[in-house]
Image: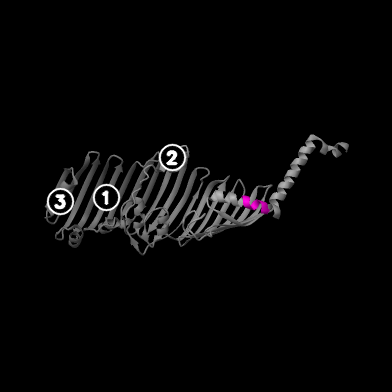
Amino acid sequence: MKRIRNFHHTMPGRVLLFILGLIVLLALLLFTPVGNRIMNPIVEKSLTSALSTPIQVQEFSLTYNRFQLLIQDDFGNTLSTQGGFSLLTLRMYAHYRIECFQKSGFNPIAQPFKTEGSLSGGIASFTIHGTGNIFGGNLLYQTELHRFHLASLHLKMEEIGYQKLLHLLGYPSKTDTLLSGEITLRGFDQRDIEGEIFLNTKTEHFTPTPIVEDSNESFTLKSLLADPNGQVRPFHIKVSLDASLEHAGVLEQFVGVPLAGGLTLKGRIEGDEKLLRLRASSDVARSDTSLTILIPDLEPSSITFDLKGGDAEQTFGLFATPSPIQGEISAYAELNASSGHINIAILNGVTIPTALKQHYQITQPLIHFDADVNADITQQGVHYQASFTSDLSRMEIDTTTTHDQMLRELLKTLR
């Protein structure tokens, strides 16, 4: 008993008492109203530094198992959160609400938005789910973190304003298109990503805008996936895509050519860092169309395109070009970085004299024809081989090397 009574006089006893006293002092500093008032400016300064904008702490309360925080920037944007936690199990739960009415301050997207939701969990698994209002539409989202690394993502969109979204990405757009859909992706933490993407758009008005040239030549798929040291860690991906667009023109800034008309697309991207393969199919222009893109070492290598039995007018319309003909069109192409082969066949073709005169300044009578054109693309140029049979005459073109020469031969036949 004597040893126990004199324990506080020993060196271990003094160390233990110091630690206990420090814990009590920290508890008083952190978990009492007086301590909260002392911590308030420290929290305010830390948030100002973290968010890179002046922050005012309107409310701050911290106890041993609960917290509450309300902050506001100079522009009136607010963030509030309250919840509880356990220091023993290292778990927490909370509700949050963010309202950004102005485009400045801590607003990360320079567009007004609101979101609220809840978060819960611990180090092993942490879940965030909530709802939001952005770009005039609604969001429902849920994400899961494993040891603070993204594991899965679920996002549901309803009538998101596409024009505002493109402006955020730095692209011009003049359309009332509304974007809806659902994205489910999982396996990020294991680098074995699977999921599904469903997208659809509704468009009543669309005005083409100039195609923006991407000046960032260094941006590639490899640079997007690489770590800060430029290395791409091994991964595997298998994701399906199902998209339905009322007006394909909404894609023109991404594909680099004017588009129009409706488009449905179903596909799958599958592979790893050594070889990715994108396969897609569509009934565009009432055709049976397939597309395959090979991406070895994260560098696009080759494209194979096969369109069978498409409507000629709708095919021209897809590329926002007035159609000079009617009929059935088929096309096949194999293209890579240095060469390619293209075949275009037209069956039961009929010229449209009014379209030829109005849009192409060519005066021709109505002509029924069949045509077959082959083009071999090399670094030296383009070589054509073609046949054209009409109710006026027949023409064969063999290994023509220029566009102009082929067109001159074609016009001679049509005169």
Residue 275 vs residue 311: left or right? right
Element under disc 1:
strand
For residue 331, which numbered disc appears in the image?
1
Is-magenta flag for residue 38? Answer: yes
Q: How many marks?
A: 3
Whether the residues at callouts 2 and 1 have beta carbons within 8 Å, the answer is no
Residue 391 vs residue 381: left or right? left
Q: Residue at x 24, y 47 (%)?
A: 343
Is-magenta flag for residue 144? Answer: no
Near mark 3 (Cα within 10 A), the count class, few <14, some 14-19 or many ≥20, is: some
For residue 410, which numbered disc appears in the image?
3
In 3D space, how far apart are the residues under numbered discs 2 and 3 (Cα atoms)? 47 Å
In 3D space, how far apart are the residues under numbered discs 2 and 1 (Cα atoms)? 31 Å
- Earlier in the chain: of badge 2 and badge 3, it is 2
Element under disc 2:
loop
Magenta stretch secondary structure, dominant: helix
In this view of the protein, which residue sits in the foreground, 260 or 308?
260
Split into 4 quadrants, where in the image is the C terminus?
A: bottom left
Q: Which residues are magenta?
A: 36-42
Which three-letter amino acid code belongs to the residue tagged 1?
Ala
Which three-letter amino acid code belongs to the residue tagged 2?
Glu
For residue 361, which numbered disc appears in the image?
none
